[in-house]
Image (cartoon, coloured by chain):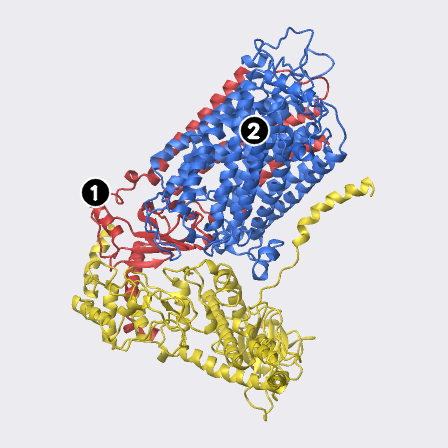
Amino acid sequence: MSTANPAVERAHDDAHAHDHHDIGFVQKYVFSTDHKIIGIQFLVTTLIMLMVGGALALGVRWQLAYPWTNMPIYGSLFGQQGGQISPEFYTMLVTMHASVMIFLVIIPVLAGAFGNFLIPLQIGADDMAFPTLNMLSYWFMWPAIFCFAVALGVVPGLGVNGMNAGAAGGWTNYPVLTGIASAAPGSGAATTWWLLGLTFVGVSSMMGSVNYMTTIINMRAPGMTMFRMPLTIWAMFITAILQAFALPVLTAAGFMLLFERSFGFTFFVPAGLVVNNADPTVGGGQPLLWQHLFWFYSHPAVYIMLLPAMGMVSDMLACMCRKPVFGYKPMVYSMAAIAGLGFIVWGHHMFTSGMNPMLGMTFMVSTIMIALPSAVKTFNWLGTMWAGRLKFNAVLLNCTAFVSMFIVGGLSGIFMAAVPVDIYIHDTYFIVAHFHYVLFGATLFGVFAGIQFWFPKMFGRMMNDTAQQVHFGLTFVGFNVTFFPMHLLGVAGMPRRYADPYLHPYLEHLLPMNQVMTWGAILMGFAQFILLANFAISIFYGKRCGKNPWNANGLEWVAPSPPGHGNFEEIPVCYRGPYEYASPLVEDRDFVMQTDVLPAADESPEPAPEPAADSN
Amino acid sequence: MKYFWVFFFAVFPLAVLGLCFAAPSMNWWFPYGNPAMTPLGQQIDGLFYLILGITGATFVGTQIALVYVLWRGAVDTEGKAHFSHGSHELEVIWTIVPAGILLFIALYQMDVWANYRIKANFPSGLVAAGEEGGHAEFSGPIAEVTARQFEWRIRYPSPDRVFHNEREVREWLRNPQPDDLHTVNDLHSPTQEPVMIYLRTEDVQHSFFVPELRVKQDAVPGLVIPIWWQALKPDEYEWTCTELCGWGHYKMKARVVAEPAEDYEAFLESLRESQFDDGFQTASAE
Amino acid sequence: MSRRAQLLLIPLLGLLPFAGCGSSEPAAFRVREDVGKLMKGTKSGGKARAKVEETIERFYGSPSELRVWERLPIDFGGYRGRVVVPEEPDYNTKSAVTIAWDAGDVGEEAPTIAAGTRAIYRPLAPAAAPAESEEETTTEEGNEVVSEPVAAPEPVEMTVAGYDHEKGLLVFEQAFPSPPAAGAEILVDPGAKLVYGKHLYLEHCMHCHGVTGDGNGPTARYLNPRPRDYRNGVFKFTSTGTPYKAHRHDLALVVRNGIPGTYMPSFLLLEDDEMDAIVEYVRWLACRGEQEKFLADNLLGSFSQEAYDAADKEGKQALVEEFEAYLASDDEFDSWTAIFKESVDDQLVKKWNDAQAEAAVIVPDVPRVESTPESVARGRALYVGGKAKCVNCHGPGGKGDGQQTRDFQLVKGTTKTHPEPGLYDDWGNQIQPRNLTLGLYRGGRRPIDVFRRIKAGIKGTPMPAAAISDAEIWDLVNYVMSLPYETPAASAPNDAAATAAKPTAAGDTES
């Protein structure tokens, strides 16, 4: 790694050779193999899907606040008489909200959008290792989106067997409910499409993760040792490994369920069940098998949905606090620990499922211990912010919100890791509160920060910070009004996925609280239009900026904004870690870029002199 | 503006704490504001409060730290930030201390879980030693509960039936008997003594959840799962389903009636009477 | 366009989601398919279909505005009483009377009558006028009274200002139009029960049974068997004899216990008043549906759109004119109304009231025959024999696979056969005879329930009433109820055994 990367040089020459060669619009912006374009494509796609998923969520919220009333928009589009929705439509909303948000927003926005855009730039490569594979990984999202759209029930005429409602098995899609077509209105064709969509998402993710691992291992710029990589890259690297190991299990499980539904295999459905007076099932499947396989992927997937945001936030916090990341190596190790432990905690989703109760104890210990690396990271972020010179812009605010919300989400996780307490709160709104604090509260605030932080690099213009601050404030308020009371609903014993909880006397009095939460959600939903508008307007009218508008250290800030084909004007050479803010080595500024050659210091691109912090 | 944001982040934990402290008095806490109605449930509540205490303290501590660093960041604008890449000592401290606390939490939970779910630890009247072995206290299950879309069907053994050992229970679970008594959505049980039911499902997964008793167990196709509890107070306890079971998931409303032993027996007798009603004597009541 | 204007356009995109934000159609009763086949309109404007719809609407209203038509055999709720002492108006604009409630409406407890409740005051008819008068009131959202043009004075709408139960004093916001006479009728909160029933129905029942009770709610299409369509006024599981409609208890029993083996769940935890209101609303929907069906059946012969189109096409001008003249004339419409009214008395009032009578309920004339092996053997003989012919449908093993399920059956009332072999119910759905070995009894598992199924048959299905003696039915019941179990003889324990076993059971629980 100590010599210049030949791939960089080759691509660099190519870029020169083709300087005046005009590639067509389609090749440049649509079927592009340029990682930056692909990253932006992922970003725009996921932002659109974010709005779709949010719209589905608002449908859910409306039903919970004003059950069986005229629902705006949905009522006139899909509603029955009186504009009210049907119970199976509600379960569809719940299912597809989760599916869209997880598979089409959170996973692709982190790995797809930021992973693609940042990995080559931050390690000083000209592109991904496999550009065409990269392009395919984006375009495999579209069959997935199509399949999910069909599963949503919006494409008429594709139903068979009279069962053409939207997929309604929950995002966990547990058979037997989804294994027998007659078991639920959505368990007909829609579930098959849902599984196909899942498979396409998996293919897309897998292509991405192979690419990321190869790129990060092989294509780092001269001097960019593993421990000089920004934490974002570490996070992407660990995420890619997680994906590569966990995803095959889900894919296999998905195919097993598809085969079960389509070709009469019986992996998951026991014999002799009669549902809806259909013929009795045959075979000897085991419903718990799906739960094991599904959660073997989906628990690590939770970290796939979080680790990259953790990495990005570490980068941004250091820059906005003008201070090195506190405990760089502990940060790396704790991410690795999360990834490692992440593989042996899946059983905590199944404490009440009827699996061997002895396993409950094992999984409880491993699950509770996974809180430890998360705690270490939290303390390190606080350490990073301590005695910094904070730049109070929306990036910092979103990152702070990330830390703050992650604390809530992490702490509430301990309740459900404890088996006895989980007996009570399992499948109640406490769980819903918990994962929204982690996935929205942490990840999405990190993403909002990331969009603004790397926007100048993407488009050469800045986003309007005031608009972002307004967006942040409204989102933060709306988010907490919506999700914090869910903890209380959970303690009050309100189960998830109830179209009308108020049939049950012990939940009747929670209606007003749900109404407040719904208005919080509506506020939050409409606040996102500020982000979208700011994003769209800034692309064309934002303030132009130079290479390094944030005075940051990473290699991506050496490249022009936006970087041209091949990214760097000359091969960057990396002399130090990415977090040398407030370094006493320079007088006139508080940052030292990774490529800066300082006359005072005896530095070389050789990996030998590690940054001081690494010795701790 | 930056002080506004420091204030903003300070308001959040205050609002959260305020809400949490107000919640019990606003009836946003455990159902009907009551402690659990079973001894095991009260232990679960105890563990809940223990974790709440630990996490609450952590929450307050970290949020104070967060607001403090923000405030310091807003005040200190001169010069450069403190140049530090970390501290080995601090890292060790904040790894070891939480690790100890977390391990304590984990180990402290074991007994309750074992008593709740591992059959060998069930109260002695509910389990017999071995398949054939029995003992004087053995009483067997009070009922078999079968979940289906979207109701709970309950089968009681005839009051005349006495289970002597596990094999007889198994036989009974396998073969419905003509003298069994049936109800739907209405499970009666005696109070003050441990009672056990066997849970199964006729179609998809369901979950047996009685919030006030802190009992929850999924019903899984192909499995017959024992659940036990000991209701402390005669009452009607609401009983719901907590595993998505189809479009009518929310409709699975039922009740567990805990009543004094003599009322329970009277209930079974009246159930038997009505179930074998031939309409002849009761003609005038129709 | 200037750049600034372009900038302003972008936030407008945020308004896009509101594009679909129109108000949806309010819930409405769906028109029966047959009615849809009636003439929509002729050249001169005769509209058979519209007239049927108007008629039904006039007497039943819409879900948001239910009508109280007191002739129907329905308990609409509210409190009915008669003026005892007309008080002098002693409040500014208010008037007061003391009232005696009808026994059925107000029991021991004081009725809860809040200020602002609607009331209908019906002045005494002049001596010459006929005693009977036709009354309809609408409820809640717009209480209006539709009255036949008889000599009786118009009912007056009033608003209650207050009520004192001890004195029996009812105070109104308005003054009476004429001083009220003792004995004049006052109806407070008319239709309260119906409205309550509707709210509960829309919450619990509508997703399957539909707003109209046509068994075609949004979820219905995924269910097997299909939810009941009440509009024929036929309910399957009743305690009443073959010619009778369902008793209120029968509907309540089904709602309370659900129907095992179907998606009808148990609504055990409904309060009694909720149950009453739902049952009453279902009966009301059944009445509505029956009348609609009656009108459609009677008119479809002569006034179908198809017949009109055919006549028009073939140039049968005379026929066309006849249609038009007939439909255009209001006299003719009135004559319909007359038919309609008769149909109410004959088809609805009498039948539904008869079903409530004690005589309608099937009571065995002998107690259950003890379930001995001999009785079961006799039952078996009946089962396979020519007298009860159970085996034809339910099959030799009771698995519901008899010969009839493989034969082509005639469509009821025609000479055509169904396209598919098997048995059909009156709603046109293919149905399976019950598999008796499963131990699932849709109409209830008490011996008396099974007895009634055999004695009266199952209404609306090919299951006929058995023409055998009650003692024989009991043998058959014993046989059928022994089918799910391996040892056929072991059925219900006799009372002696139960009493003897009691101390053992008690001792057991104590230990």
Residue drawn 30% across the image and 72% down it:
C454
Q: Give coordinates of residue A463: x percent, y percent.
A: 72, 33
Q: Give coordinates of residue C169: x percent, y percent.
A: 58, 76
What is the distance, in whole Å, between disc 2 and disc 1 at their CAs? 54 Å
Q: Which chain is yellow?
A: C
Of the pair A180 and A467, the residue shown nearer to us: A180
Q: Secondary structure at mark 1?
A: loop
Numbered-mark total: 2
Q: Nearer the viewer, mark 2 or mark 1?
A: 2
Of the pair C504 and A240, the residue shown nearer to us: A240
What numbered label is drawn on residue A308?
Answer: 2
Q: Secondary structure at mark 2?
A: helix
The chain under label 2 reads A
The three-letter code of the residue at mark 2 reads Pro
Image quadrant in which you'd find residue A118: top right
The chain under label 1 reads B
